[in-house]
Image (cartoon, rainbow, N blue to C red):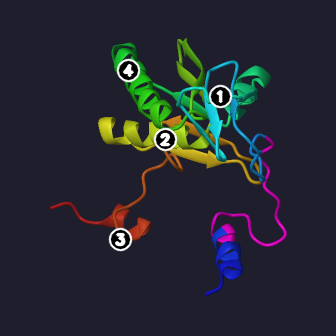
Amino acid sequence: MSSAVRSVSRGFRRGRGEGRERQDPYRRDAKRAGSGCCPGCGAVYLRGRWTWRGRPFGAQAIECPACERIRERTPAGILRLDGDAKNRAELLGLVHNVEGRERALHPLERVMVLRERRDGIYVETTGVHLARRIADALRRSFHEAAALDFALGEELVRVRWPAPPRGGALRPRRGTSPSRAATRPKA
């Protein structure tokens, strides 16, 4: 398989098939020449990647995409965590722990805003991957799934935890029709 065919098929699997443009205005398609350092957070741009290394000699001042998103208040991930008051401390600790691990490895994945309200906790992230990882950690810790909603054509994910119930009414057991389940004799 040639590299041209491989790159087209890879893009298609990710939802950016032929003719579709990437919709994230904060992601650059071409790598910048030289090195740079973000004046806001200190992340270093070196050989096409953002890292947490020391500032290289002769690095220009370049604002990283995460700091751009924070300055413009444009989140890539929006999470709504519903929980009672006794779970709040545990939820906040989980969010901070996941963000700390992700930020150590990926400088562009950060929590922008964390708000506590009466009806829950609201978290805005600079990357979709951090929002997904927080949702996965919530599922593993509390054994409750999160509802993920990806905006079509944009780099935005909305997460609601726990996921709202679907349909509202209970469905009959597998293999029984609703009419048979209602008329079944009691034993």
Q: Could you tell which of marks 3 and 4 lies nearer the N-terminus?
A: 4
The one nearer the camera, 48 or 164, is 48
The picture places residue 141, in percent across and down from the top left corner, at: 31, 36
Q: Quadrant of residue 64?
A: top right
Which residue, given by chain and number where applicable, does mark 2 sit on?
163
The picture places residue 108, in percent across and down from the top left corner, at: 61, 35
Q: Which mark is residue 57?
A: 1
Instruction: Tell me if residue 19 is in the magenta stretch.
Output: yes
Amino acid type, callout 3: Thr
Q: Are marks 1 and 4 in contact (CB under 8 Å)?
A: no
Amino acid type, callout 2: Ala
Over which residues does the magenta segment extend? 11-25
Which residue, given by chain and number where applicable, does mark 3 sit on?
176
Q: Could you tell which of marks 4 and 2 lies nearer the N-terminus?
A: 4
Indicate left or right for 72 with 127 as reference. Answer: right
Crowding at mark 3 (Cα within 10 Å: few <14, some 14-19, many 20+): few
Cα–Cα gap, marks 2 and 1: 49 Å
The one nearer the camera, 60 or 92, is 60
Indicate left or right for 57 with 30 as reference. Answer: left
Amino acid type, callout 1: Phe
Cα–Cα gap, marks 1 and 4: 38 Å
The picture places residue 157, in percent across and down from the top left corner, at: 63, 43
Instruction: Tell me if residue 78 is in the magenta stretch.
Output: no
Give the main secondary structure, helix, strand or loop, of the magenta stretch: loop
